[in-house]
Amino acid sequence: MESRRAAWIALAVVLIAVVALVVVKVGWRVASPPGAGAVPDAARDFTSAELSRSAALASRLQPNALFSLAVSLMISAALGLSSYGAKIITAVARPLGGGWVWQVLLGSLALALIGRLATLPFSAYAETVLRRYGLSTRGWGLWTADVGKSFAIGVGLTALILVILYGSMRVAPRLWWAIAATVVAAVVVAGSFLYPVLIEPAFNRFSSMPQSELRTDLLDLAERDGVAVDDVLMADASRRTTALNAYVSGFGSTRRIVVYDTLLDSETPAVIETIVAHELGHAKNNDVVLGTAIGALGAAAAVIAGYLLAGWTPLLRRAGATSLADPASLALVLFVLAAAGLLLTPVQSLISRQIESRADVHALDLTRDPATFIEMQRRLGVANIADLEPNQLYYWVFASHPCTVERIAAARNWAQADREAAP
Ligand SMILES: [Zn+2]
């Protein structure tokens, strides 16, 4: 019982740390200034043809994504809440002797493969829609390679974490939760650090942005902002998409600012500078570090909560496992993680939207050019066929960014508050 008490205390400490990080570091005060007048109004900045195209695309993609999610959860539930999952896990490991490592490795591969195959038609349908709307430029060969690589990376990471989990249960039956929580959190940190050098190159080629006035201006902008940037990278996104985007990934020595090559072909230097100014906001606020810290602590909390719930045997028996340490429990563990992940999605999205708003304000403060910011949002909204008038519930659960129309309204409010000429 000593160990359970320690686990409860550790869980409380980790959860308090997560809440403290979210409250203190996310910057909740960047919302619209009081009394700000501009309200989101899609018809003000977009033509009715643009609005109906946006609504049409969303009405094809979103139900498809929801069906895919539902199918994936139902399969996970069917495998985890019955003994079918356990039967598959023991069956796939049997030819190799049935040891626990093989059960975990081949079991997670088999379960993931079932889920992936079941949702493949939804992914393929989404691809045909993106193609029809001119957003996707990749052929089925590249699509298949992308799906295969994403699957391999996902299964590899899941299997690694599950081996750590089940391995520590065997090594230290009473204190495994402390070991596993620490190691899993460290894996999350290492993963985020190595992501730009290990994962991103599997999908895109990166090159330094060619010498140009724009490149010099972007580096000057970073210097003026006090963000150490010695290169701006260009990704060959045009192999797959016509969408316009930029992002920051990694931290410390792996941190990089990446712009899609699609931007350079179609947008003015002023628009690209405003996009990079937003990304500099993420860099300056250390948003990748913040996201990584929240992810690592969240993963540690999940491990400890798993340990505390493991005494709850009816579900384990139902799943055909003798205890949590029995790899036959793997399908149940994956289902609980999927369900908990879905329940936490609205919270994650809310935090992400707040971080994005803060980066927008940073871009406005840095460039002091709300007119170009609004032009940039308009251009991206049209080119990416963004969901301009999102369904409120869908937005609340899934949207990682404020919608285009909100971002434009926020820029108008910024201009008003700063007495700039409001465009
Ligand atoms: Zn952003």
Image: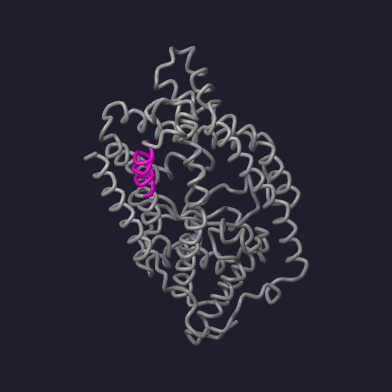
- Quadrant of the rendered structure where residue 41 is? bottom right
- Quadrant of the rendered structure where residue 56 is? bottom right
In the image, is residue 306 part of the stretch drawn in magenta? yes
Q: 362 or 233, which lies in front?
A: 362
Instruction: Establish if 317 lies above or below 28.
Output: above
- Quadrant of the rendered structure where residue 48 is? bottom right
- Give the residues in magenta: 298-310
Q: 261 or 350, which lies in front?
A: 350
The x and y percentages for residue 288 are: 40, 55
Compared across the picture, whether 9 is left or right of 384 comes to: left
Compared across the picture, whether 400 is left or right of 387 comes to: left
Name the quarter where the N terminus is drawn: top left
Compared across the picture, whether 155 is left or right of 167 comes to: right
The x and y percentages for residue 133 are: 74, 52
Instruction: Establish if 166 lies above or below 393.
Output: above
The structure residue drawn at horizontal position 27% and vertical position 48%, both measured from the top left corner, is 10
The structure residue drawn at horizontal position 53% and vertical position 80%, both measured from the top left corner, is 413
Instruction: Establish if 300 lies above or below 398.
Output: above
**Type of secondary structure dominating the magenta stretch:** helix
Name the quarter where the C terminus is drawn: bottom right
In the image, is residue 173 part of the stretch drawn in magenta? no
Q: Residue furthest toward the left?
A: 2
The structure residue drawn at horizontal position 37% and vertical position 57%, both measured from the top left corner, is 290
Instruction: Establish if 17 lies above or below 268.
Output: above
The x and y percentages for residue 5 are: 25, 44
